[in-house]
Image (spheres, grey):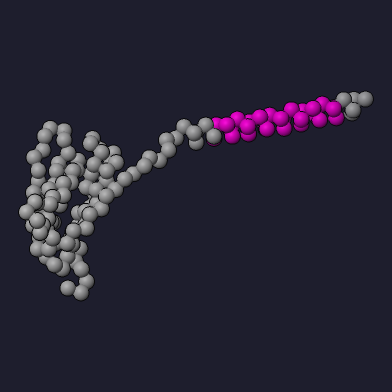
Amino acid sequence: MIALSSFIRRCLLNRYQSSRIVRHSGIALLFGLSTMLATPAPALQKFEQYRIMGSEISAVRIGPQEVEDPATLIIELVSASSDPVEILLESDGDLDECKLTIEYAIGDNASYIQITQHLTADTMNGVMVTECVRISIPGY
């Protein structure tokens, strides 16, 4: 009789411990899912890229900047009409180096300027010129 009661106790104890393990793993699963739901989803990021031949650029200048407004870079393109064609780029970063890069390419048939602008950047105004490079065209 004593052996039977100790056997029953062991079975009940094993059942209790296994149910605790299942309960704990359920809690761990809920904790894991809740942390996944609490993390922010990746946001939409938008970029614009410009490729302008050096021979198509007539002038470049930095526009006027107001307090807390992004810096502006104005690129004037060669135009067949009497109206000037301008590209206006805004950036929360410094544009002086980009202006200098473009100035070196003005009138050059053998290179082009590649400018990448991040329009949803994590900056005050949400715009940032992330790339401004002069690229030589092979074969010229």
Q: In which quadrant is the N terminus drawn? A: top right
Q: Which residues are magenta?
A: 6-32
Q: Is residue 24 left or right of residue 65?
A: right
Tell me residue 89's x, y (percent). Answer: 18, 46
Image height check: is 36 above or below 82?
Answer: above
Residue 118 visible somewhere in the drawing = yes
**Viewer-proximal residue, 49 or 101?**
49
Residue 44 is left or right of residue 87, and the answer is: right
Tell me where residue 22 sits by quadrant. Answer: top right
- Percent of width and height locating residue 40: 42, 35
**Side of 129 where 19 appears, left or right:** right
Look at 8% across and 49% down and name the residue there: 61
Q: Quadrant of the C terminus?
A: bottom left
Q: How many marks?
A: 0
Vertical order, 53 against 26 (above or below): below
Residue 120 sits inside the magenta stretch: no
